[in-house]
Amino acid sequence: MTDLEVRTACVDDVPGVEPLVADALSRLATLRGGVALLEMIGLPQGAGPEEVSSALCGQALLAATTIVATLSGSVVGVAVVVRTEAGLDLIGVHTARSMRRRRIGTTLLDAARAIASELGVRFEALALPGDQTVKSLLEAGGFKARLLRMAADR
Ligand SMILES: CC(C)(COP(=O)(O)OP(=O)(O)OC[C@H]1O[C@@H](n2cnc3c(N)ncnc32)[C@H](O)[C@@H]1OP(=O)(O)O)[C@@H](O)C(=O)NCCC(=O)NCCS
């Protein structure tokens, strides 16, 4: 898609990002590890789409950066990267349902990878166990699982 733009999110993106975040949050609630992933970036348990979108677009979460993909000014995709001691992790990527399989996810993945490259740090992506679409996106981009972190508690 030629007019697809990718950039860092700002507060003006909150209304456009919110429906995507609402969909991602309802999906996360069904996935093992989803709540822990939100906690990991400092989001309070039970935070709703508006609160989460404001925190993400306002770049208010410690060490997290939010990227948006827009098409003709409308937000069609969102990704969140987190800076860690070891490098940069892509911790979430979401494309609007009606816009999937048009390389928006790949463009966001490439943008996240470019940030790590600019910083000169290693880049990795996280995927939750049941999140097959994200795993497929990553595998299509040449990523392979290196470590499965397993827990007995939740
Ligand atoms: C994962 C996701 C971001 C992919 O976005 P997308 O814009 O459709 O991805 P792309 O078009 O760049 O896909 C690139 C390649 O990845 C693979 N792929 C992506 N989605 C796939 C799917 N559902 N099934 C199989 N392969 C898939 C394909 O190889 C695809 O290439 P192709 O379309 O030429 O076959 C999207 O499916 C999504 O938002 N899923 C929900 C994720 C989510 O909300 N998780 C919880 C919070 S993070």
Image (cartoon, rainbow, N blue to C red):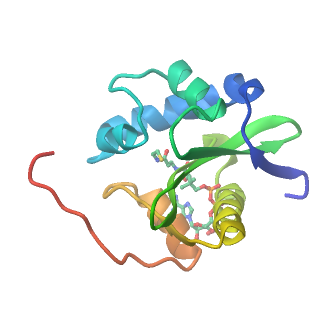
Q: Nearer the viewer, residue 44 or 96?
A: 44
> Who's the residue at 39% across and 55% down the image?
131
Q: Where the N terminus falls, by quadrant?
A: bottom right
Q: Quadrant of residue 37?
A: top left
Q: Quadrant of residue 107?
A: bottom right
Position in image of residue 53 (x %, y %): 58, 28
In percent of width and height, residue 140 lies at: 57, 74
Q: Nearer the viewer, residue 74 or 151?
A: 151
Q: Nearer the viewer, residue 65 or 77?
A: 65
Q: Which residue sits furthest left?
A: 152
User: Residue at coordinates 89% horizontally, 39% vertically from top-left?
Assistant: 72
Horizontally, residue 146 falls left or right of residue 14, namely: left
Where is 134 relative to 39, above or below?
below
Q: Judge from the rendering whether residue 133 lies leftward or rightward of residue 65; answer left or right.
A: left
In the image, residue 136 above or below residue 100: below
- Quarter the C terminus occupies: top left
Q: Please provide percent x and percent y for residue 30.
A: 31, 39
**Image coordinates for residue 148, horizontal then vertical, percent:** 27, 69
Left or right of 34 on screen, residue 74: right
Residue under the point 41% across and 22% down: 47
